[in-house]
Image (cartoon, grey):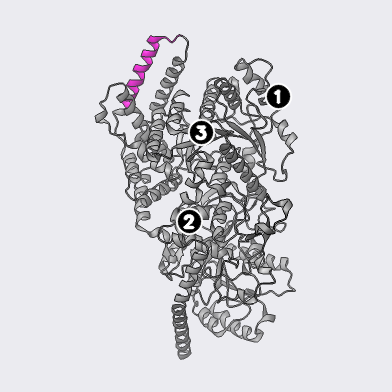
């Protein structure tokens, strides 16, 4: 017996060595395949200087076209553009072909005539084009998984992270292990997965805290792997989709052979490991499983990708092996798994394979893998598919009810390291940035204490300054300002600013400044990301109630919730450290202006330049502080001056803003349109207004009439309080006037058809006096009922034609007369320039497992195209340069 055991082990070892030799021989061919694929897709230039997030997000002429790719080189950009827009068809790599102009029908001369070529069914293409030995050509389709792998290999870490985050929102399976045939090592995408945050329910639901929001990298769940051994007649990815989909709706998380182009051969994607999660909603009648579950999928045969299979055995609670045949080689490899705690299940199609051989090897494997006959499932063409899926789900549930391992993505990364896989997060820049973040966050024991001791210039000192500055501003516009009171206010302001200037930045703020001052651009970006996640972990607000509870809270005013006292404390974030820097800069600048401090003794004059670097790299910066409802004027103008110097000749700006109450979907709308990073979700993010900069491609800037677009999100500033709220309403109206007054284009996001927030209506009336009338687009977002598709133009017009008590009260306050009761009555209202949009709901079904609504993405694209067309055609206010914007900020 011992001799036989040694013989089996020797055969396994020699089999593995033979596999390694075959792999080595194939490296040259694989390298050629990868290079050919990169060349085919136009990505060969991004192997040394990787494609960045800024490259992917810049506005070009293609941003206004809803075109389909015509050549393989169009595919990466088409994928990125659709993924940004949360388009459920982003993975479709079908190409179209333009007909030659002389063959187009005369009556359609002005239109682009397209002929869709479904390459996988075209009869005139030779059958050998599907051979795995043939490299793709410009006339052959590209497998979507090849496109994904090539794009990830050509992207920097931050674009990879954005791609994975958007794929998660689209409910696509995420790449976990990325194969790289060029250098013959595979990368575990831990960093790319870091930005994946999901929300799910627990059972029983309906209690505060029953909804949990967490990073999928940190959350532990049982993991189930599905792999193929040699050939399987059953589609592994289709089976996974069936397991994850509710009975009434098919969801294609994993791309599979039955989808368009799903049968096209993979050239570089074999060895890819994907992951997707089932997340419960908290409703027993809808949830397939009562708790989160991770499902992993290995592309390719386990015999050719033994390292990935070994990884899956280390982290999975159970592995499902699909095959038609069990060969001697695979039997020996599986025998080496003896002692593994993972449970193994076989899914066979015996009528297509060697039935007796399969049974012989299975009988040998049963004691080795600690299986029994219930671990062998048979699925043939006559098998009831619904019943089979139900059986697989029952096995998964049974495994989780018994003691089984629960792993996070971080745990998976540790297992990958032990097996010699590269982990993307292990680079020096990333680890140095992580260490600095941990040094800062380690000192945060109590949030209130930390803010008081480390962020000293905020809180009460900043509130006092804001109040004095507000009173000074009001006196400035008074017809007969009392000079004595003005002098008292100025003296008080200087005293407060001197008190602020007497402080030095705390240790935590100094460390933050060192982190964003790093000479390494990559380390700086890593540090900011680490700070976002680190602060979110140590300073989380109280648990979120379920969406049902949020929606059933009774409104106080005019059909809107009263956010004057927010339900959750504002979470500590990067913006608080930048706000502290801004206050140091403000205090110092105020003293220099008053002659109390020589300009040569300034210590913080470089702070706006540091913050600007972050803005240029895609970080939203705070324009208006949500705690004091005040803009830091000197800080904002300092940033804009630095921007003017940095951009030099490319300083023409268009300002686009979005206003609306929290929870109306405005931040999601902006993020989907332009790929921005505004915080989404009521009660989650900071309450202030934030700005982000988008670059316009040089080739398009002349046509569009600007070099950059500055996007402003009003955040939680507009709470919807009525005019009776007094000072709070007046402050909201002033801030709405400020944001809209800076804008060339404003999107007003509405959650209810007839209720425009009073502060916004108030701002319209104020701006009408100034003659500054940007182009306005009113967007009604259907946040709940996805079955409502869109209203007819006449119905849309009626949304703003109905008089309301709010409108009458606001108009009365502005003493405009009784003749004006709706926006349509105002002098600036021009139905040719202003539009009302109806945006369908984002989800089909109940989150978190709901599919993305394609109509949402299409509607958002049309809105984006309209906004850009209005900018190009001059329907918006005259475009500004940065100097003009600085002056406008001061005046407003």
| Separation of marks 2 and 1 at Cα, in angstroms | 49 Å
* Number of residues whose C-alpha sits closer than 10 Å to that of mark 2, classed few (under 14), some (14–19) or many (20 or more): many
Q: Where residue 261 sits in the image (x, y, percent)?
A: 63, 65
> SS at mark 2?
helix
In the image, residue 252 above or below residue 36: above
- Of the numbered discs 2 and 1, the one sitting upstream in the chain is 2
> SS at mark 3?
loop
* Number of residues whose C-alpha sits closer than 10 Å to that of mark 1, classed few (under 14), some (14–19) or many (20 or more): some
Judging by the rendered image, the residue that carries numbered circle 3 is 879
User: Which residues, given as a range, are shown in magenta?
Assistant: 480-499
- Of the numbered discs 2 and 3, the one sitting upstream in the chain is 2
Judging by the rendered image, the residue that carries numbered circle 1 is 803
| Magenta-colored stretch includes residue 764 | no
Which numbered disc, 2 or 3, marks the residue closer to the eye? 3
| Separation of marks 1 and 3 at Cα, in angstroms | 33 Å
- Of the numbered discs 1 and 3, the one sitting upstream in the chain is 1
| Secondary structure mostly seen in the magenta stretch | helix
- Of residues 876 and 235, which is closer to you in this image? 876
Q: Where residue 763 sits in the image (x, y, percent)?
A: 57, 24
In the image, residue 572 above or below residue 136: above
| Magenta-colored stretch includes residue 492 | yes
> SS at mark 1?
loop
- Of residues 397 and 173, which is closer to you in this image? 173
- Of residues 459 and 575, which is closer to you in this image? 575
Judging by the rendered image, the residue that carries numbered circle 2 is 160
């Amino acid at each position: 017996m011992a001799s036989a055991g040694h013989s089996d082990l020797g055969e396994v070892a020699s089999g593995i060595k033979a596999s390694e030799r075959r792999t080595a021989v194939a490296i040259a061919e694989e390298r050629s395949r990868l290079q050919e694929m990169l060349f085919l897709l136009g990505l060969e230039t991004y192997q040394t200087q990787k494609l960045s997030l800024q490259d992917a997000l810049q506005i070009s002429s293609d941003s206004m076209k809803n075109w389909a790719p015509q050549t393989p080189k169009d595919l990466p950009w088409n994928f990125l553009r659709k993924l940004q827009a949360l388009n459920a068809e982003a993975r479709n790599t079908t190409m179209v072909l333009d007909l030659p102009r002389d063959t187009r029908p005369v009556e359609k001369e002005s239109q682009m005539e397209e002929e869709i070529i479904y390459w996988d069914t075209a009869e005139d293409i030779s059958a050998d084009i599907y051979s795995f030995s043939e490299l793709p050509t410009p006339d052959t389709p590209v497998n979507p998984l090849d496109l994904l792998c090539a794009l990830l290999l050509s992207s920097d870490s931050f674009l990879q992270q954005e791609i994975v985050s958007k794929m998660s929102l689209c409910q696509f399976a995420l790449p976990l292990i990325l194969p790289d045939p060029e250098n013959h090592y595979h990368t575990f995408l831990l960093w790319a997965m870091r930005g994946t945050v999901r929300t799910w329910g627990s059972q029983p639901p309906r209690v505060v805290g029953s909804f949990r929001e967490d990073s999928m990298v940190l959350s532990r769940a049982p993991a189930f792997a599905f792999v193929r051994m040699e050939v399987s007649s059953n589609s592994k990815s289709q089976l996974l989709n069936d397991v994850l989909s509710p009975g009434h709706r098919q969801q294609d998380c994993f791309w599979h052979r039955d989808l368009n182009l799903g049968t096209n051969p993979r050239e570089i994607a074999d060895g890819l490991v994907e992951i997707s999660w089932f997340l419960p909603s908290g409703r027993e009648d809808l949830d397939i499983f009562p708790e989160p579950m991770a499902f992993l999928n290995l592309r390719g045969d386990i015999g050719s990708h033994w390292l990935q299979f070994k990884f899956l055995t280390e982290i999975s609670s159970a592995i499902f092996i699909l095959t038609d045949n069990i060969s001697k080689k695979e039997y020996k490899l599986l025998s080496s798994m003896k002692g593994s705690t993972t449970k193994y299940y076989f899914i066979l199609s015996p009528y297509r394979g060697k039935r007796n051989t399969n049974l012989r090897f299975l009988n040998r494997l049963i004691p080795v893998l600690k299986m029994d006959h219930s671990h062998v499932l048979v699925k043939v063409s006559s098998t009831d598919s619904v019943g089979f899926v139900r059986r697989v789900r029952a096995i998964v549930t049974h495994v989780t009810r018994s003691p089984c391992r629960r792993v996070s993505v971080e745990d998976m990364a540790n297992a990958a390291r032990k097996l010699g896989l590269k982990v993307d997060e292990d680079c020096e820049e990333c680890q140095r940035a992580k260490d600095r973040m941990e040094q800062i966050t380690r000192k945060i024991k109590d949030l209130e204490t930390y803010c008081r001791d480390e962020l000293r210039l905020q809180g009460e000192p900043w509130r006092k300054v804001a109040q004095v500055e507000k009173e000074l501003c009001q006196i400035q516009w008074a017809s007969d300002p009392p000079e004595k009171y003005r002098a008292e206010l100025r003296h008080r302001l200087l005293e407060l600013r001197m008190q602020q200037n007497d402080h030095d930045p705390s240790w935590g703020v100094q460390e933050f400044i060192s982190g964003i001052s790093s000479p390494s651009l990559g380390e700086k970006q890593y540090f900011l990301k680490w700070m976002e996640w680190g602060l979110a972990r140590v300073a989380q607000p109280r648990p979120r109630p379920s969406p049902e509870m949020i929606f059933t809270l009774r409104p106080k005013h005019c059909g809107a919730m009263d956010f004057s006292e927010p339900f959750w404390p504002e979470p500590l974030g990067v913006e608080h450290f930048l706000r502290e820097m801004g206050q140091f800069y403000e205090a110092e600048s105020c003293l220099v202006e008053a002659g109390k401090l020589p300009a040569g003794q300034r210590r913080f004059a470089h702070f706006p330049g540091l913050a600007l670097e972050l803005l240029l790299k895609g970080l939203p910066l705070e324009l208006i502080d949500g705690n004091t409802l005040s803009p830091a004027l000197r800080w904002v103008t300092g940033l804009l001056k630095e921007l003017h110097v940095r951009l030099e000749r490319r300083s023409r700006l268009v300002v686009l803003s979005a206003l609306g109450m929290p929870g109306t979907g405005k931040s999601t709308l902006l993020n989907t349109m332009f790929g921005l990073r505004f915080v989404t979700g009521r009660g989650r993010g900071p309450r202030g207004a934030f700005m982000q900069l988008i670059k316009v491609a040089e080739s398009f800037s002349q046509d569009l009439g600007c070099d950059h677009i500055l996007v402003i999100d009003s955040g939680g500033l507009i709470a919807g309080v009525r005019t009776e709220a007094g000072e709070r309403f007046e402050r909201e109206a002033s801030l709405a006037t400020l944001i809209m007054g800076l804008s060339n284009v404003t999107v007003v996001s509405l959650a209810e058809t007839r209720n425009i927030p009073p502060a916004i209506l108030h701002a319209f009336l104020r701006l009408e006096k100034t003659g500054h009338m940007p182009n306005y687009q009113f967007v009604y977002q259907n946040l709940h009922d996805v079955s409502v598709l869109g209203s007819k133009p006449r119905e849309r017009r009626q949304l703003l034609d109905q008089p309301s008590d709010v409108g009458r009260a606001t108009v009365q306050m502005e003493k405009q007369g009784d003749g004006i009761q709706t926006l349509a009555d105002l002098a600036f209202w021009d139905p040719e320039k202003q539009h009302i949009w109806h945006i369908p709901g984002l989800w089909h079904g109940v989150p978190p497992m709901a599919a993305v609504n394609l109509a949402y993405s299409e509607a958002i694209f049309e809105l984006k195209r309209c906004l850009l067309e209005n900018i190009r055609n001059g329907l918006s206010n005259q475009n500004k340069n940065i100097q003009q914007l600085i002056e406008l900020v001061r005046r407003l």
